[in-house]
Every structure is written in structure tokens, then in C-alpha cells.
Amino acid sequence: MGFQKVAIHSFKGGTGKSNLTASMAAVLATKGRRVGILDLDLTAPGQHEIFRLDQGKVRATFDDFLWGHCAIEETAVDVTPQAKAKGGRLYLVPASMKLEDIQRVLKRGYEVAQFASGLSRLEEARDLDMLLLDTHPGIGEDSLLALAASDVIYVCFLMDRQHYTGTAILLELADMMGKDVRLIVNKVPTHYSPQEVREKVEDRFGRPVAAVIPFEQEVMATESSEVVALTRPSTHFSAEVHRIVEGLSGGKKGAG
Amino acid sequence: MAGKMRRQEALDRVLGSLLEETGVSATVLLNNRGQLLAHRMPSGWDKETVGAMAATLGGSGAKVAGALGLGLSRMAILDCERGELLVVVFGDLMLTAILAPENVNLALATIGMRRAVEEIQAILDLRPMDLKIDRQQVADVVREIRESDFGRSILDQLGGKG
């Protein structure tokens, strides 16, 4: 199995996508993989907070690459020490927090060809096994582009009526693109039985559920300032992230 | 206020039925911070102490289950020399039952507690899952995207699927 691109996506924001992405990548790195995270939520970036990157010290962001200011490999920051992901390597390609960059993306979008070539070059330059794409929520062009570029898509959602129809739309689009798509139900109210949630969601959406993650005060209290799957191993969140990662058999080195 | 009173009465009634029908000696309904919602127990028992002990047992069970990757804990049982202590965890709530040795019928108590939990969930309006999907809207939006210039170009690049 070769290099694998995995999108973590959702119809609505606030599903815990970024924290899931960071934790999945870090767990993969602890299993000896060389993993990259690309913060594609270009209008509302957040990965740099989870890894506590000082934006002032970031040399270049993904936005700089998109506008032709630098090579993609210059944007990849080695966050292996921050994540305490011993064993493998973990790189983060952060997005810009500068207002002018965010407005530029909103106004002009970006070139498909530039995006695709960047992913390939990043794989080569850092010898990556996997690249996790923390996408911009919704069904906009940038989101669809990220889904189209991925081999596996995890669609996250909450037990909330605002999420159901949008999630079903994403699943149809992923099917149309011929992608391997799996569901993650996050922040599930704790009075629901996870098994019952899993069965009902699989029945209603007709797709496999990779994880049902209960709402946990301890996870919320981290305020997205740490890689929860590594720092809080006794949480249900951490256990479910490990379960998700075990289901990812791809990458150059095979199952971890 | 009247609704709150009726809710309290309904919870008391559920716990009363649990005592009468299953041989449970005492029962306490509390949240995971140890605050009591309802209780039924013999005079002379300290409901606060029973509640705090039960919350500790239920909370520890949940932590252990999480750490071992066993999922959410549903029930903790403390098998003692002079009886049994059962704690059913459901969401932020715990229902505790104490059985004296002469009344111990674990199976009956377990079934009774599960039924009580369902009734408590209904009283507290903990709704069942909805998962309502507007299939027509899904079809309309997907068609719109597929027929857009951007959608067509993406599908072309992927080999003309769809």
C-alpha cells in the first residue's frame, strides 16, 4: 500500500474534526509512521493551537505555498516533540492566521493544479506514509477539492438535526467520487448507548461507523491546547481514536 | 413549579416500585457530582453517604472502563459479605440499589433497575435519537453539485464516476 491521503471532514463546524485529526496523526506517528497534517481550514485555521505553535515563529504557511511564495516543503513544521509522538515523525503544515490571507482565500479561492502538486511534493519531500487533511467544513469547492484528493474520508457529525441532511449529502458526494468513506459520531450525549447509536446511524446512513465518541468534560476542558489521544489516554476519546487508527490499514509500511 | 413537583413525584414513584417489585432494600438516584435526585431507603440510613459512596463506585467504574477501552460502563456490582451494591450508570446519572442478603436476586434486581432507568429517562425527557434526513434535499443538492462546472471538472479528473 502506498502513500495515503485521509480527509477528516464535516458538514457543519464544531464537530471536533481538528482535535480528531491531530490525535489520529499523533497516534499514527507513535506507531512508527511518517505522518503529515495539512490545515485546510484556511478561513478558520486551528491546528497550530493544538500543537501550540507560535504563529509568529512559523516561517511559511500553506497560504504562502498557494500564492507561490515558497515551496510546500518549507511550510512543513516538525511537531514530533510537541506531540510527544515518539517512534515516527509528525509534520504540520499550518494555515495563515493573517487577515489578508484569509480574505484572499475567500475572494479568490485557489488553483486546483497548484493544490494537487503540493500534496505530491509534500509526500516526496518528507517521505510521508500518510497525509491527514483537516478540511474546511461544508460542501464548498475547497471542501470538495480536498475530498476528491483523498483516498479515505472520515465524515464527523454530532447528534444534532442540523447535521443529518448535510452529512447525508457528503456521503452521496463521496460515493459519487468513488471514495472509501466512514462516519465518526462525536460528542454523543452520554445518556445514549454507544452501541445503539452505532446501529441506528449505520442503518440510517448506510455507511460504516468508525467511532462513536461520548461527550467528555475532560476533553472539552483541554480547550484544544493538547493532543488529547496522547495526553489523556484514559478518556473514551483516546480509546476511540486508537480504534479509528487501527482501521486505517494503508500507508507505505502497512498496518501499524 | 407544578411540572417540577410532578416530575419529583414520578421519580419517587419509580424508585418505590423498584423497592416493592424486586426486593431491593434501598435505592438512590443521583448525578455524577453526587447530588441526589430521589431516594427510597429505610429510616436511619444516611442518604448523602449512600449517594457519595455510589457516585464513587460508579465514577471509578467509568474511569476503569475508559482506560481499558471497554466503552461506557453500564453497571458496577459490589458483591459484599452482607449484601450487594449495584450502580447503573446512564449518561450523567446513576441509579443505585442495595440488596440485603435475604433478598438477593441479582437477575430480578438488574431487570428491575433497567426498567426503572427507562422510566426515569422518560420522566426527565431524555429523548430518543431522531436522525431525520431530508432525502429529497440530499438528492437536489447532489444533483446541483454534479451538474455544476466545478462538480463536472472534479468528476472528470476522477475518471468520470457518477
Image (cartoon, coloured by chain):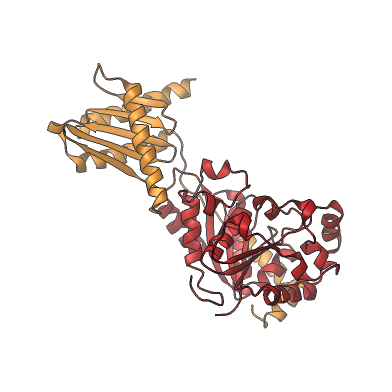
Chain colours: A red, B orange
* Position above or below: B94 against A152: above
Q: Nearer the viewer, residue B17 or A195?
A: A195
Which residue is found at the position 81% from the left and 67% from the top?
A: A66
Q: Determine if residue B153 is in view.
A: yes
Q: Nearer the viewer, residue A137 or A94?
A: A94
| A233 left or right, relative to A124 | left
Q: Residue furthest top?
A: B44
| A7 left or right, relative to B56 | right
Which residue is found at the position 68% from the left and 55% from the top?
A: A47
* Position above or below: A194 against B119: below
| B99 left or right, relative to B87 | left
Which residue is found at the position 53% from the left and 63% from the top?
A: A30
Q: Residue furthest bottom?
A: B159
x and y percentages locating residue B31 in the rendered image: 42, 32
Q: Residue furthest left?
A: B102
Count of residue discs: 0
Which residue is found at the position 45% from the left and 45% from the top?
A: B128
Q: Nearer the viewer, residue A24 or A177?
A: A24
Q: Nearer the viewer, residue A157 or A173?
A: A157
x and y percentages locating residue A43 in the rendered image: 77, 55
Answer with the quarter of the image where residue B16 lies.
top left
x and y percentages locating residue A234 in the rendered image: 45, 49
x and y percentages locating residue A206 in the rendered image: 50, 65
* Position above or below: B117 against A164: above
Q: Determine if residue B118 is in view.
A: no
* Quadrant (top left/top right/bottom left/bottom right) for the C terminus of chain B: bottom right
* Position above or below: B60 against B148: above
| A95 left or right, relative to A68 | left
